[in-house]
Image (cartoon, helix red, strand yellow):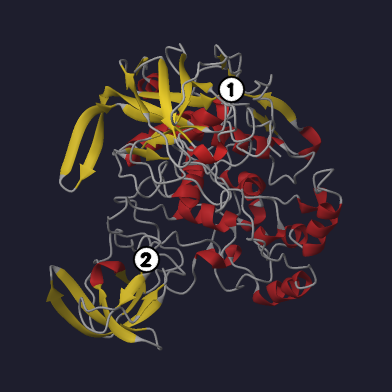
Amino acid sequence: MGAALRSVLLGGLLGLLALAATVPRQSAHADHYPCHVPNYGFGFDTYEYEDYVTVYNHMIELAAAGLAVPPPYRLPSGEWVDVSYPGLETGPRNARQPRSHEATVPPSLYKAMVWVESGWAHAGGSVPYGGVGPVLVAIDCGYGLGQITTGMGHLASPPALDIRVPSARQAMIGTHPLFNLAEGVRIFADKWNSAPEFRPVAGNGDPAALEDWYYAVWSYNGFAFINHPLNPNRNPLRGEVWHCNDPNAPGFGTFTWGDYTYQEKVYGCVRYPPVPKGQSYPPPLAPGGPDQPPSSPSLAVGDTAVVRADGQCLNVRPAPAANPPLTCLPEETRVTIVGGPQELDGITWWQVTNGQVTGWSAGQYLVKVQPPPAADAPVNPAGRMWPPLEVAMPSLSVPAVAAAFAPAAYSECADRGFAGGCAAMDFPTTIPELGITPHTDPTPAPAPPLAGAFLGAPKLQVIGERAVTLQVTASSSTAASLTVRNLGTGIGPFRVRTSAAWLVVRHPNDPPGRVVDGGVAIGKDLPVVVSTSPRSVQAGLDSVLEIRINPALLPQGATGGTVLIEPLLGTLQPVTITVTVQRSGSASGPPQFPFRRILPNVTAEGSP
């Protein structure tokens, strides 16, 4: 499709924006997120693959094809673990066909979504690639690679097994990257399948067409007006899609993350895939020709640059390496190079200004703003995490498309709770007379045996006493150590349950307040980075835990409880540790404490 057909007619757009201004804006409500202090989510550990680009590409391809995880299976507790692929409905609104497992999710689309959601990280920022540590958790309790929130609530039962006690399904999603991605694809498929009853239909409802996923992509982040392309809070000149931080893509250095809707971010990363962290982007390609001569990546006085500090701010100092900093510029701040360079402590320093503050910053966190490429310039695939794909965004210059995106059409449907599926918002993705046709994802089908390689054959062994006595005072307690070891292969996930809230299981060096609700023991077939400076790698890793008592929660008269370590994959033999409480100067025997209740059908919750 030509650029002229993809562009929005400015006059028509401004008219539609005038209508959009009549839709009430959503106010921010960031006061109380479920995983924002003082609240906290589940304490899950996970393994972050060091070769994350190769591994997560394969895992996403398996999940998108419905081949990633085993069929639903039952644990000794009676719970089911089920994140299986549901299949996809196909066809337009008036000829919708039943779900089929032969219809699959375009993997490049979900790769872009995972990048937007988590930056292809399953573990938190303190965990190196190749390491083991806490899973990535957002303040809205989104977990891991797919930032899974649906079905992951911890303050109600269900979906939790009990309040702040994870179900086995939740623990698998939090601890194992393959199950996390499979659940993300399941939710994404569910968003697709919610049309036509509760969502509009894009195009002919063909899962092979990237453009036909437009409303499902929107819905993955919430089908709210904040993601409407005509939301008046968005800059109408931002362009079709987000540049995905590609310095050679249109809009880079001018428009930032917050200027784009969720769909524009995802489709932007389909069009301009990222490069692995720490790598440089390839030069643009000339339209219909070979590579353009790469412009010098080095900075020079007079250049414009933007801050790229991996989500952090960039210190501006009064002199190279001098303290204290004058200010800290947020990610994507635009600056002008006015002096330098100077070399100090192995760092190249440049004098920069943002028009308000002038000082010195480390050049490694500055990216030169390149001239925008030609409108039809192809995207250079070299070094990217997946191949770039052409996509056609809804062209509001086409009357049928403009009508579908009229704010009144959205408001009318939202007022009905989206019942009936918003038929007025259906729009065509194929308009042959205008040269508009949808695009497909040519990614080859994955090899099913890959799933078995990623699942491994974990066999967990719990090393430690099965009956322990802990001494407790008014402010502290002794600890009992135990080790979970994987005698098999792969990631060995397990859940930790205690019979009472005053019994705490954690790692010896965990920060105050952290508990372990689920962990992993790594088989010796997987390399584990245990130190980055100096770099140290070993084969496999045990999970070393300690049992303690929280005296503040210990009721008067409580004399004992139990801890249950439950393997969740592979050999499924749980281990119970009986804990006797010995208060200062007293002794007592262990009573029988029941575990908190186990609810049937805990995996049956749907995706709203």
Q: Amino acid at mark 1?
A: Asp
Q: Residues within 10 Å of mark 2 (few under 14, many from 20)?
A: many
The residue nearer to you, when weighing 122 against 57, is: 122
| Residue 480 percent across, percent down from the top left | 37, 26
The label nearer to you, 2 versus 1, is 1
Element type at mark 2: loop
Q: What x and y, as percent, mark residue 585?
A: 43, 28
Q: Give the position of the C terminus as an image quadrant.
A: top right
The N terminus lies in which quarter of the figure? bottom right
Task: Classify residue 367 by image quadrant.
Answer: bottom left
Q: Which corner quadrant of the image does residue 460 belong to? A: top left
Residue 566, can we see it? no
Q: Is residue 144 left or right of residue 354?
A: right
Left or right: where 76 falls relative to 475: right
Instruction: Judge the density around disc 1: few (<14), some (14-19), many (≥20) Cα neighbours within 10 Å.
Output: many
Badge 2 vs badge 1, beta-carbon distance below 8 Å: no
Q: Label 1's element?
A: loop
Q: Amino acid at mark 2?
A: Asn
Q: Disc 2 designates what residue?
A: 248
Q: Is residue 519 above or below residue 124?
A: above
Answer left or right for 506 relative to 8.
Answer: left
Kindly identify which numbered label has been placed on residue 82: 1
Front residue of 431 and 446 = 446
The residue depicted at 41 percent of the width and 52 percent of the height is 273
**For the point 17% across and 80% down, which residue is it?**
341
User: Could you tell me how many numbered marks the image carries?
Assistant: 2
Q: CA distance from mark 2 to mark 1?
A: 42 Å
Q: Residue at x 69, y 35 (%)?
A: 193
- Does residue 172 appear in the picture of this structure? yes
Closer to us: 334 or 324: 324
Q: Position of residue 552 (x, y in %)?
A: 54, 41
Q: Position of residue 434 (x, y in %)?
A: 64, 58
